[in-house]
Amino acid sequence: MAEDIIPLKEEIPSEGEIIYKNNRELFYSFDKKKNCYTQHVSYQYEANQVIIKQGWDELENRLVEIIKKINAGKLSPLAYFMERSQMDVTMLAQYSGIRKWRVRKHLVPKGFHKLSQEEKNQYAQALDISIDQLTNPEIFIQITKSNGKEVNG
């Protein structure tokens, strides 16, 4: 019955199969020795770890492309932090309290440079960053170097 649905304790992923270390979850298993159900915190199954790692790798690739566009003057730093937080225009507008059309306007450098102090505060709070991070273009050089990827505009 329930033993057929819930995996045995031995079937829970072991620590030796870890591909992606940032995602642990709670598993329920049946321990035959104790003849009871137990909880076990571990990493996801290998197949799930591969999928999650691919997703994070893809996000990192998109961030590198956004940094290139920022360095080329096509996007504002807001685009980087929005993508890093995995937000779209609608979500950022809702979290920041700034209208969608204005968020879109602030994604380009010309509109971004016209941000008021209040809008900077709203974005910084919504993105969980400081105003200095939001407005300091040097941060992208540091991010690029820390990721070990060379980004040329």
Image: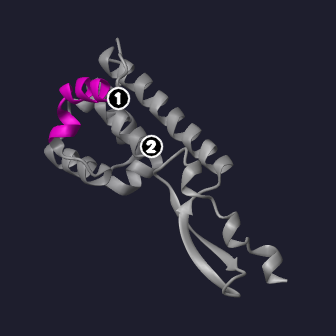
In the image, what residue occupies the spot 40% across and 46% down?
A: 85
Q: Amino acid at mark 2?
A: Val
* Local SS, label 1: helix
In the image, what residue occupies the spot 44% across and 23% down?
A: 65
> As displayed, is residue 78 above or below residue 44?
above
**Mark drawn on residue 89:** 2
Question: Where in the figure is residue 37, as x and y percent of width and height?
Answer: 66, 84
Name the outermost residue toward the top: 152
Q: Quick one: quadrant of the N terminus?
A: bottom right
Question: Where in the figure is residue 112, as x and y percent of width and height?
Answer: 26, 32
> As displayed, is residue 15 above or below residue 86?
below
Boundaries of the magenta span: 132-147
Residue 111 magenta-drawn? no
* Local SS, label 2: helix
Q: Quick one: quadrant of the C terminus?
A: top left
Q: Is residue 62 left or right of residue 92?
A: right
**Mark drawn on residue 76:** none
Q: Earlier in the sequence, mark 1 or mark 2?
A: 2
Name the outermost residue toward the bottom: 35
Is the residue marked by circle 2 packed among few (<14), some (14-19), or many (20+) residues within 10 Å?
Answer: some
Distance from the alpha carbon under mark 1 to that under mark 2: 26 Å
Determine the image quadrant of residue 149.
top left
Question: Where in the figure is residue 25, as x and y percent of width and height?
Answer: 54, 64
Q: Amino acid at mark 1?
A: Asn
Residue 137 magenta-drawn? yes
- Find disc 1 in the rendering and name its residue: 147
For the image shown, how many numbered marks are present on the structure?
2
- Observer able to see residue 111: yes
> As displayed, is residue 128 above or below residue 115?
below
- Observer able to see residue 115: no
In the image, what residue occupies the spot 55% across and 41% down?
A: 53
Question: Where in the figure is residue 12, as x and y percent of width and height?
Answer: 65, 64
